Amino acid sequence: MLRMIKGRHAAGALALAVALGCAACSGAAAESTGGQGATPASSQTSPTRAAESSSPPPPPTTISIAFGGDVHFEGMLGSRLAADPDTALGPVASILSSADLAMVNLETAITTRGTPEPKGFTFRAPTTAFQALRAAGVDVTTMANNHGMDFGLVGLQDSVAAITASGFPVVGIGLDDAHAYAPHYATVKGVRVGFVGATQVLDDPLIPKWTAGPGKPGLASAKEVDRTVRAVQEARRNADVVVVYLHYGTETVNCPTDRQQSIATTLAAAGADLIVGSHAHVLLGAGFMGRTYVDYGLGNFAFYSSGSGPNTQSGVLVVKVQPHKVVRAGWVPAHIEGGVPIPLQGSAVAPALANWDSLRGCTHLSATPPR
């Protein structure tokens, strides 16, 4: 369910307008009701009614979807969450809330129990993480990533219980593969959007343990290509717009790997209109693969990065969509300070946008869709 906060932030709305351009923003108000009007008193068609029937159909409804990258609540972010969940993600909330729908990658287990898995970094957060996401304008998140089961089966069970108790929409995790790969659907202005989440990144020793299967709790793994394709095809049958959020890529490398490009090509063919991803901790390029819009890497979002390195370059991808069509995409650049993305202003915006555009050079993607 969309919160009342949506669309009320003037600063966020202005940033979306700048990122997308007025042509895309103007379409957001168009909405077809599908109604047929009153029943005519006479069976004869009047000249006025004949003229009405020959008029062009209304334009398709356009909605906006905003995407952020990796989110956890460790370190300074844990302190922000404990102090006030409603402001934990900081001023970027105005950007997320101004879009019709918003999605991020929640890269943590939601638990206070369990034993850390044998890996380099383990993340966990309390259930107030969902309150923080909701307050920031996020409508759906994926937990299909290499930290979703950092505290084992107990941590996963707690995460699923927290998801159920909070009512917050989450994809990519479940008590079996049917739940982990199941799309989440949200309808805005009559446009039904299906969201799928899966991870291509799992520590090799943990792949069997972490991958969801029949009767087996776990995560939706994009290593299981056929199973991920079926999830996308299911969403395609039931939605006007299909979004796939993947956890993939190589850390600190800002060009997509062959595996990233291969899975994106496969899922585009399966029916994905929009494919976004995270994991590398740096930004990767974005553009059109045919009529499918692909962003290979959204970078860190709410993360304990600091300083001025590439891992502090962040932002919000805002995409305008119509049924079965991506109309336009834009980038709202930000810099991570104190763990949260602070939208850039003034003279800092242009070079950040130029850098984001330049990342497309190694992606084989196009800046525009085919005619």
Image: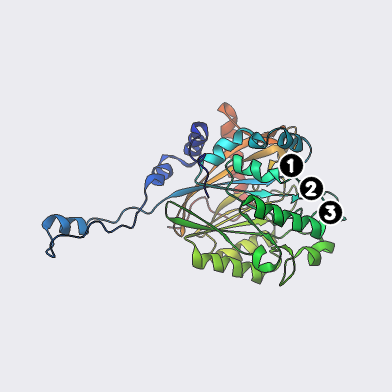
Viewer-proximal residue among 128 and 259: 128
- The residue lying at 47 percent from left, 38 percent from top is 17
Say which mark, if any, is on residue 114: 3
In the rendering, at what x and y percent does residue 143 appear?
69, 54
Say which mark, if any, is on residue 270: none
**What residue type is disc 1 on?**
Phe
Q: Nearer the viewer, mark 3 or mark 1?
A: 3
**What residue type is disc 3 on?**
Gly
Q: Earlier in the sequence, mark 3 or mark 2?
A: 3
Q: Mark 1 highlights which residue?
A: 73
Q: Earlier in the sequence, mark 1 or mark 2?
A: 1
In the rendering, at what x and y percent does residue 190 appear?
42, 55
In the rendering, at what x and y percent does residue 108 appear?
74, 49
Q: Mark 2 highlights which residue?
A: 123
Mark 1 secondary-structure assignment: loop
Seen in the picture, residue 148 relative to 314 is either above or below; the reply is below
Mark 3 secondary-structure assignment: loop
Q: Is residue 307 left or right of residue 2?
A: right
Q: Earlier in the sequence, mark 3 or mark 1?
A: 1
Q: Is residue 193 left or right of residue 250?
A: left
- The residue lying at 82 percent from left, 54 percent from top is 151
Among the 4 quarters of the image, the one containing residue 201: bottom right
Gap between marks 3 and 1 measured at Cα: 17 Å
Viewer-proximal residue among 370 and 81: 81
Viewer-proximal residue among 152 and 13: 152
**What residue type is disc 2 on?**
Phe
Q: Is residue 54 at all visible to an observer of this figure? A: no
Viewer-proximal residue among 258 and 5: 5
Q: Are marks 1 and 2 in contact (CB under 8 Å)?
A: yes
Q: Is residue 172 left or right of residue 29?
A: right
Q: Residues within 10 Å of mark 1 (few under 14, many from 20)?
A: many
